[in-house]
């Protein structure tokens, strides 16, 4: 039974990420019939939609939109690439810039929570390193309650950020990017574009599930 639960947990956490990477890689073939690269499409969409003050930059730290710097950042393959994955990922990140421009409240809430989550993750790292001491602390009067509160604050905050992120990602993919891509991507490529947009959103599903699992694992351990 334990082995089945472990296999099931691994499937839940690993498969969405593996599937997302497979989809993104599947559509990286260069397309000469596309009018521009991912960066060029991003810049064009921002100009066309009147989203001013947002730059498009190359990054080595993964595709993302930075609301503080007001910048769409794309990995080199997607910045310079002329593939379905490149233009679709670029449109997805522009979708976040549009959300910010329009004051989309879930994105603003996520931005406020990110700073808190980073501090909470540091607390989580401290909890992991101090685990032996914490197990001794739980044997003292009131010690268990203190440790449980610390665990909930740390892993619970991270889980909350990831849960808030999910609707933000799906909105950027399907309410913002998809309608725009229909005007630039050939009709026979739209099914692939939908798969890439789903993959962009699903990268956060695994992270959300992992955060919830970490919180649950700590609570189970501390109750023993």
Image (cartoon, rainbow, N blue to C red):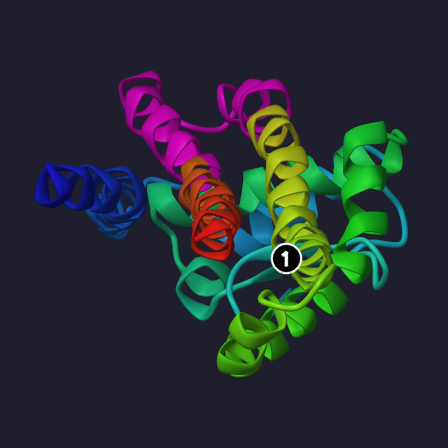
Q: Is residue 221 above or below residue 52?
A: below
Q: Secondary structure at mark 1?
A: helix
**Is 106 or 172 nearer to us in this picture?**
106
Relative to 107, residue 218 above or below: below
Question: In the displayed image of the protein, which residue is found farthest to the front?
Answer: 141
43 left or right of 4 in image: right
Q: Residue at x 27, y 52 (%)?
A: 30
Q: Is residue 56 left or right of residue 192?
A: right
Vertical order, 208 against 55 (above or below): above
Residue 92 visible in the displayed image: yes
**11 displayed left or right of 89:** left
Q: Residue at x 39, y 41 (%)?
A: 34
Q: Residue at x 23, y 42 (%)?
A: 15
Task: Determine the image quadrant of residue 125.
Answer: bottom right
Give coordinates of residue 7: x percent, y percent.
14, 43
* Residue 193 counted in the magenta span: yes
Report crowding for label 1: few under 14, some 14 to 19, many 20 or more residues within 10 A (C-alpha).
many
* Chief SS of the magenta region: helix
- Identify the residue at image location x=56%, y=39%: 92
Q: Position of residue 124 (x, y in %)?
A: 61, 68
Which portion, as a residue range, is magenta?
A: 173-201
Name which quarter of the figure residue 168 lies in: top right
User: Camera-side residue: 153 or 36?
Assistant: 153
Can you see residue 32? no
Position of 52 with respect to 92 (left or right) is right
The magenta stretch spans residue 111: no
Q: Position of residue 63 (x, y in %)?
A: 54, 58
| Vertical order, 87 against 193 (above or below) | below
Quarter-wise, where is residue 109 in the image? Answer: top right
Give percent across and percent down for residue 105: 85, 29
Residue with the mark numbered 1 = 151
């Amino acid at each position: 039974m334990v082995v089945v639960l472990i296999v099931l947990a691994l499937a839940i956490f690993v498969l969405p990420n593996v599937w997302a990477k497979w989809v993104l890689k599947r559509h990286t073939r260069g397309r000469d019939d596309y009018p521009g690269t991912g960066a060029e499409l991003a810049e064009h969409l921002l100009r066309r939609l009147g989203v001013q003050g947002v730059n498009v930059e190359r990054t080595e730290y993964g595709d993302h939109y930075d609301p503080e710097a007001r910048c769409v950042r794309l990995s080199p393959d997607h910045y310079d690439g002329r593939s379905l994955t490149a233009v679709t990922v670029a449109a997805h990140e522009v979708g976040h810039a549009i959300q910010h421009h329009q004051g989309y409240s879930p994105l603003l809430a996520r931005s406020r929570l990110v700073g808190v989550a980073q501090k909470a993750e540091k607390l989580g790292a401290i909890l992991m390193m101090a685990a032996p001491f914490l197990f001794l602390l739980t044997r003292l009067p009131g010690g268990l309650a203190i440790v449980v509160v610390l665990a909930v604050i740390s892993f619970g905050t991270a889980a909350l950020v990831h849960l808030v992120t999910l609707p933000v990602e799906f909105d950027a993919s399907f309410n913002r990017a998809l309608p725009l891509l229909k005007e630039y991507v050939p009709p026979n490529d739209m099914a692939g574009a939908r798969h890439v947009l789903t993959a962009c959103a699903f990268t956060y599903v695994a992270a959300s599930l992992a955060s919830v699992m970490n919180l649950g694992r700590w609570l189970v351990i501390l109750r023993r």
